[in-house]
Image (cartoon, rainbow, N blue to C red):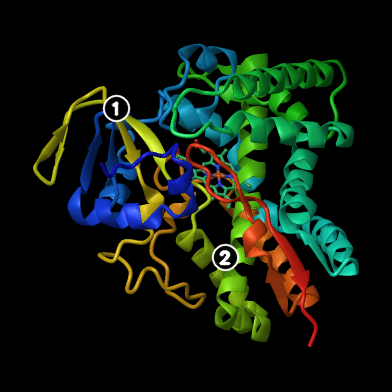
Amino acid sequence: MRELNPFSYAFHEDPYPTYRWLRDEHPVYRNERLGFWALSRYHDVVEASRDWAVYSSAEGTTLERLDPRLGDYLPMMIFMDPPRQTRLRSLVSKVFTPRRVAALEPFVRERARHHLDRLAAAAGGDFVRECSALLPMDVIFTLLGVPAGDRDRMRGLMDASLHRDPDTPAIPPAAVDAMAQQGRYWFELVAARRRRPEDDLVSQLIAAELPGDDGTFERLTDAEVAGFLNLLGAAGNETVTKLLANAIVLFARHPREYAKILADPARIPGAVEEVLRYTSPSQYQGRTLMRDVTLHGTTMPAGDRVLLLTASANRDERAYDDPDRFDVERAQLVPLGFGYGVHSCLGAALARLESRVALEEFTQRFPRYAIDEARLERVHMSNVHGFSGVPFRAVSG
Ligand code: HEM
């Protein structure tokens, strides 16, 4: 029987026919076997994303329910509702404003050039392993203050902690172990910066004062600082890596669209938005219902899990004309690829900057290139969509 199964490897290859089926035939979809509901239409996803009081993040944002012990061990605002989420977010939001992020452009460009020059010298290589996995890592780990010698290992652990086996929501033992190792690392880093502060985000978070309800100020606990590092590290690494590789694959498949950004680099920011819409690195946001909700004549009871399928909403023909056409000049609606509402992506400005700069540099070095479709490798994660390997080569002429 046809179903939406976020753990199916075949589904990861091409989720879009399933999304269309859901939007057309089951706008309030129920999967009894895996125990969840799903909303797939643009309007429904926007409304639900806005309503944090009914659609709670406190039990996690992927289909797998969060182990409640994780919330105590590594508290992360993405798994909280306001007012606590709002208070924590206000602490870091100023680091990621478009103005503060714009100041990072020379550094981002220098890193992008470094990786792409090496690929250009070899006339190609693996775009993920040699560029799109490395650039976001350089940027977010430099901001956080992760020593250079620890970065590859931490990124590997992040990938491992998100990997899922085929067809099961059970978290593989290797993923659990990778999460535990990351947690230990963040606590050790916090302890090291408490002893000797440096000019980095870890030290700033340790020193930050958080206004309490009664007008007094509190400091973050070690667990809260470690939780921030875990969240920012993972969010900053995983998604930009996927967006950039999705872009390179899409442009190889749509040479006319590539020609447009080659002809006019001012189209690159719009192209980034279109890549995000067309193949969203984050496919859905999971929520728990805080009360019964009736939509399209179906009642979803309080306590049940609901997936807000942003990747489907982005292809909804009720919102976009000809949504399956990849068009870098398309007028965008609310960019649901970065989520929407109180949790909307804190790193959106940074992600846009990294993506724009990487594409500007890529187009200059590879005006013509080909990807090796047969050797593309996909990640298999619960809600993160994209490639772990994209072999490509320059084409002369
Ligand atoms: C293309 C790249 C990116 C995509 C597609 C993306 C996507 C998302 C989405 C969909 C959400 C909403 C989650 C929810 O509602 O449950 C989110 C939240 C978040 N993102 Fe991103 N993200 C990207 C890059 C980044 C970067 C570079 C950072 C680094 C700072 C970052 C940090 C965060 C944080 C901290 C949250 C949680 C915000 C909160 O709970 O208030 N993201 N992101």
Residue at left offset 84%, top offset 63%: 119
Disc on res. 35:
1
Looking at the picture, tell me which residue is in the foreground, 29 or 282: 29
Q: Quadrant of ligand 1?
A: top right
- Name the amino acid, label 2: Val
Residue 49 x, y percent position in the rendering? 34, 43
Looking at the picture, tell me which residue is in the foreground, 356 or 390: 390
Q: Is residue 99 visible?
A: yes
Residue at left offset 53%, top offset 48%: 385
Residue 105 x, y percent position in the rendering? 76, 59
Disc on res. 290:
none
Quarter occupied by the C terminus: bottom right
Q: Is residue 98 visible?
A: no
C-beta proximity under 8 Å, tags 1 and 2? no
On screen, residue 178 above or below 360: above
Going by the image, does 204 lie left or right of 73?
right
Few, some or many C-alpha atoms within 10 Å of disc 1 (few <14, some 14-19, many ≥20)?
A: few
Residue 277 x, y percent position in the rendering? 46, 61
Look at the numbered disc 1 and give the secondary structure of its residue.
loop
On screen, residue 193 above or below 300: above
Disc on res. 272:
2
Which of marks 2 and 1 precedes in the sequence? 1
- Name the amino acid, label 1: Gly
Mark 2 CB within 8 Å of ligand 1 = no
Residue at left offset 63%, top offset 46%: 96
